[in-house]
Image (tube, helix red, strand yellow):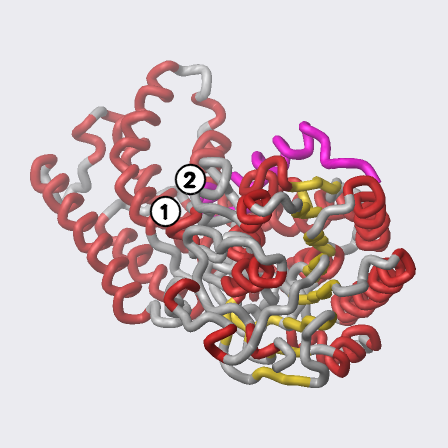
């Protein structure tokens, strides 16, 4: 299996500008303005007016960049839009029609059909399902129609109001007949202040579902103080079934994971981190830190590299080596500690190819800790929905690939005195495999470990967080904790 090329890494970053909701909104709005006024593109005055219109509308862009309106908060986006229709002369109907049409063309046809067909081999008829998923989607991407459409239509209306006023008659044309020019800009300033306060209060009073941060690991009693000595594992193997929804896993036929539950320990209330985007989750998984500390706050990584120590740094301190086998996005967080895999392949072949690459890494590099990301389940959820049979089938295939990998490790002798973990970085909600705001199906993830010193048949029902993964692996490998590691070592699993 080939590495992700440099082109693919750059393309992945560029795609995130359109995929992530925050950068998508301004990019899409400006694109629609240019499309609608295409006849004027040759005019210098058009561009000068556009610059002024962008400057006047910039505060709204900033407010909506700062504040997501996730899940049930999305309905509160329509109030500013309706008030805007009164304060500003409504934009031409054709502008709104163009925006709605292009939005669904981008999400349903380009993204859900053409993009996924070329990248992972979905059928050309995928649009028949994808439009339904976009309407239901709740995550923090551009495919969240209930959040993006009111934001886009509102900003377009304001920008078109300024742009058409400037183009027709200069500053005087900006002003509605109800106001003189000075009074209008006072009204507009008050409107912006009210919008900012409104957005803040909505989040302050109603955005209450984010998990509370756990204390630093060093502030918890050590495993020895709890009467449990950490097993001295020779190696740790981790398989992450990206985007595996816990309730769908329970419905699937997964004989190997069932065996792991019998021979190992399952944590039944393992919580992911917020926002539960893939690169964010992986960054917290292998630093033990929260996004405000490690600096990775979405899949769109503006500053590369986590800002805290990672598991890989801790392993190097004791002359041990860790490798993360995953998609190109993860390079943005962990750099050279990542062995990239191309995500441009038929999705039916992806996990098998990844596991072949994992075997190659073991044979060629023999790392002490190997983390392998299986991507087919997540990609199926994003392209075809997490509540359909195709998604469950990919979970079952991930179970088969994991079993084959485990058996191969046993045959090679690498499982002697080793610990084997399987879990997900996040779940998925309804829609296009949504994850980001911890909607139903996202928050709690499957988490099982077995191997040397791990109790058999134990179910730990106490709440835990994925930030505990890094300190737990460090304990198993006798490595120091990363400097901002949170959460306790998962010592309940140790044999007493």
Rendered-image quadrant of the N terminus: top right
Q: Which residues are magenta?
A: 1-25
User: What element does badge 2 sit on?
Assistant: helix
Q: Foreground residue, 81 or 302?
A: 302
State the residue position of label 1.
Answer: 65
Residue name at image x 48 percent, y 62 percent = 273
Taking the view exactly as shown, the residue that stands out farthest to the right is: 411
Q: Is residue 6 visible?
A: yes
Find residue 347 and report its horizontal and vertical position in percent: 80, 52
The numbered mark at residue 26 is: 2
Task: Classify residue 77 as left or right of residue 326.
Answer: left
> Is 435 situated above or below 330?
below
Q: Is residue 365 above or below residue 144?
A: above
Horizontal side, residue 218 vs residue 113: left or right: left
**Could you tell me which residue is drawn at 21 percent across and 31 percent down?**
173
At 56% from the left edge and 39% from the top edge, which residue is drawn? 332
- Residue 217 is drawn in which quadrant? bottom left
State the CA–CA distance, disc 1 to disc 2: 9 Å
Which element is circle 1 on? helix
Q: Residue at x 69, y 62 (%)?
A: 233
Q: x, y percentage for residue 130?
A: 67, 58
Verify whether residue 172 appears in magenta.
Answer: no
Of the pair 320 and 155, the residue shown nearer to us:
320
Badge 1 vs badge 2, beta-carbon distance below 8 Å: yes
């Amino acid at each position: 299996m080939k590495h992700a090329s440099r082109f693919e890494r750059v393309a992945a970053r560029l795609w995130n500008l359109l995929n992530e909701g925050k950068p998508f909104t301004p990019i899409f709005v400006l694109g629609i303005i240019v499309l609608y006024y295409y006849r004027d593109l040759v005019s210098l005055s058009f561009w000068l007016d556009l610059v002024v219109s962008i400057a006047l509308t910039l505060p709204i862009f900033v407010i909506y960049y700062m504040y997501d309106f996730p899940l049930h908060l999305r309905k509160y986006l329509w109030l500013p839009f309706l008030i805007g229709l009164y304060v500003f002369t409504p934009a031409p109907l054709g502008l709104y029609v163009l925006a709605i049409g292009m939005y669904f063309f981008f999400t349903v046809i380009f993204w859900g059909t053409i993009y996924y067909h070329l990248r992972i081999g979905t059928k050309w008829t995928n649009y028949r399902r994808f439009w339904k998923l976009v309407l239901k989607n709740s995550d923090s991407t551009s495919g969240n129609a209930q959040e993006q459409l009111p934001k886009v239509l509102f900003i377009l209306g304001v920008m078109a109001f300024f742009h058409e006023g400037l183009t027709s008659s200069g500053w005087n044309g900006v002003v509605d007949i109800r106001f003189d020019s000075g009074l209008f800009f006072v009204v507009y300033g008050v409107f912006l202040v009210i919008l900012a306060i409104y957005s803040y209060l909505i989040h302050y009073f109603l955005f209450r579902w984010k998990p509370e941060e756990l204390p630093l690991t060093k502030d918890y009693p050590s495993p020895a103080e709890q009467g449990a000595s950490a097993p001295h594992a020779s190696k740790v193997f981790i398989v992450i079934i990206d985007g595996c929804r816990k309730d769908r896993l329970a419905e699937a036929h997964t004989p190997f994971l069932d065996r792991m539950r019998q021979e190992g320990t399952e944590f039944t209330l393992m919580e992911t981190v917020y926002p539960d985007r893939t690169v964010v989750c992986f960054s917290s998984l292998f630093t033990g830190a929260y996004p405000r500390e490690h600096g990775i706050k979405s899949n769109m990584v503006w500053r590369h590299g986590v800002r805290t120590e990672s598991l890989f740094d801790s392993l190097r301190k004791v002359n041990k080596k860790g490798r993360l086998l995953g998609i190109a996005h993860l390079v943005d967080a962990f750099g050279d500690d990542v062995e990239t895999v191309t995500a441009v392949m038929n999705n039916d072949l992806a996990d098998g190819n990844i596991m072949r690459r994992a075997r190659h890494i073991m044979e060629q590099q023999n790392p002490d800790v190997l983390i392998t990301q299986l991507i087919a389940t997540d990609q199926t959820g994003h392209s075809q929905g997490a509540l359909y049979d195709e998604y469950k089938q990919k979970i079952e295939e991930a179970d088969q690939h994991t079993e084959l990998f485990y058996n191969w490790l046993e045959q090679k002798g690498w499982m002697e005195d080793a610990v084997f973990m399987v879990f997900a970085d996040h779940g998925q909600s309804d829609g296009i495999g949504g994850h980001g705001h911890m909607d139903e199906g996202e928050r709690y993830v499957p988490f099982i470990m077995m191997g040397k010193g791990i109790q058999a048949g134990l179910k730990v029902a106490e709440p835990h967080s994925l930030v505990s993964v890094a300190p737990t692996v460090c304990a198993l490998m006798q490595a120091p904790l990363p400097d901002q590691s949170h959460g306790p070592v998962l010592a309940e699993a140790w044999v007493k």
